[in-house]
Amino acid sequence: MAVLKPKVLRFESLPSTNTELARLASEGAAEGVSIVADEQTAGRGRLQRAWSSPKGAGLYFSILLRPAIPQNHWPLITFMAALAVGDALREASGVQTDIKWPNDLLSGERKICGILAEAIETPAGRAVIVGIGINLTQNAFPPELANVATSVATSTGRPPDRERILAALLDALSRWYSLLDEPGRIVDAWSNRSSYAIGKLVQVSNGDDLWQGTTAGVEPDGALRLRTASGEIKLVRAGDVYSVRPSD
Ligand code: BT5
């Protein structure tokens, strides 16, 4: 069982907490070293997308992990982080969340948190940087996020307490990380908390292909099972999932 001892470094402003932590990891930083920044000037999502990170409006956090699990289970690191964020938001601010495969937390069907797990090579071996962006307020969001994003302040109607959420997140990450070598427990817990795991009509795009189907659970390695209209099961390992209303 892996024991995680987070150690938090704080910055006023960084291009990206993931990028800075990757730099520290390449210089030999230990597992558990974490970064929090008040703002990011080049916050990133997947596929070089931008993560809006205005000053004071979010918890912009990254943690360095060196998991001793088989490579094919590494997608479960994103699952374990999503479980930890869900716990932290519930415990520290009373926000209930849904998980959208593979890396989003939703509140009221809008994105409140995104997770970016990036594997890197370091002198001490392969490592992963898990970046977590939680929206605390949304006053400074760009207009294009108005209909897709939400924040702790909007969900609760109260000013969010960043330090309390951070403390709860560190505790929850330590708890879930210790279960990473029991993939079945991570997948079961994730499936219980995700309305996207089973029976959801969705479209999945992975750049080249667009599929429509009904979700049919996740594989032990985190791949999403999609049942298409012809009854075929496709395994989705990367892509974006969109909920579809039956009349669409
Ligand atoms: C993600 O990517 O959701 C991963 C986001 C990870 C951000 C954290 S913050 C700390 C660490 N340092 C970094 O540089 N990154 C990590 P993806 O699934 O690709 O979603 C990106 C999309 O979400 C964008 O294209 C926008 O549509 C939308 N988006 C951007 N900023 C957002 C925000 N603050 N809240 C909600 N949605 C946002």
Image (tube, rainbow, N blue to C red):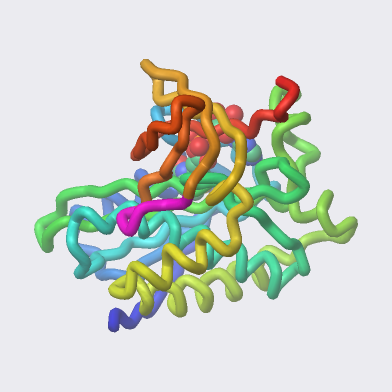
* Residue at position x 33%, y 82% in the image: 3
The x and y percentages for residue 157 are 89, 56
Residue found at the very far right of the displayed protein:
157
Q: Residue at x 20, y 69 (%)?
A: 68
Q: Is residue 218 magenta?
A: yes
Of residues 38 and 244, the one nearer the viewer is 244
Nearest the eye: 169 or 244: 244
Residue that sits furthest to the top in the current view = 208
Q: Residue furthest front?
A: 230
Would residue 110 appear left or right of 155 to someone viewing this image? left
Q: Main secondary structure of the magenta part?
A: loop
Q: Quadrant of ligand 1?
A: top right
The image position of residue 161, as x and y in percent, is: 74, 66
Q: Quadrant of residue 149?
A: top right
Determine whether, in the image, residue 51 is placed left or right of residue 236. Answer: right
Quarter of the image that includes the C terminus: top right
Q: Is residue 166 visible?
A: yes
For the question of whether residue 42 can be seen, the reply is no
Instruction: Tell me where residue 208 appears, x and y as whole percent.
Output: 37, 16
- Which residue is painted at 42% across and 68% down in the image? 186
Q: Position of residue 168 (x, y in %)?
A: 60, 74
Is residue 55 depicted above or below 1 in this figure?
above
Residue in view at x 50 percent, y 26 percent: 229
Q: How many marks?
A: 0
Q: What stretch of residues is rendered in magenta?
A: 217-221
**Residue 57 located left or right of residue 82:** right
In which image quadrant can residue 145 be found? top right
Quadrant hosting residue 201: top right
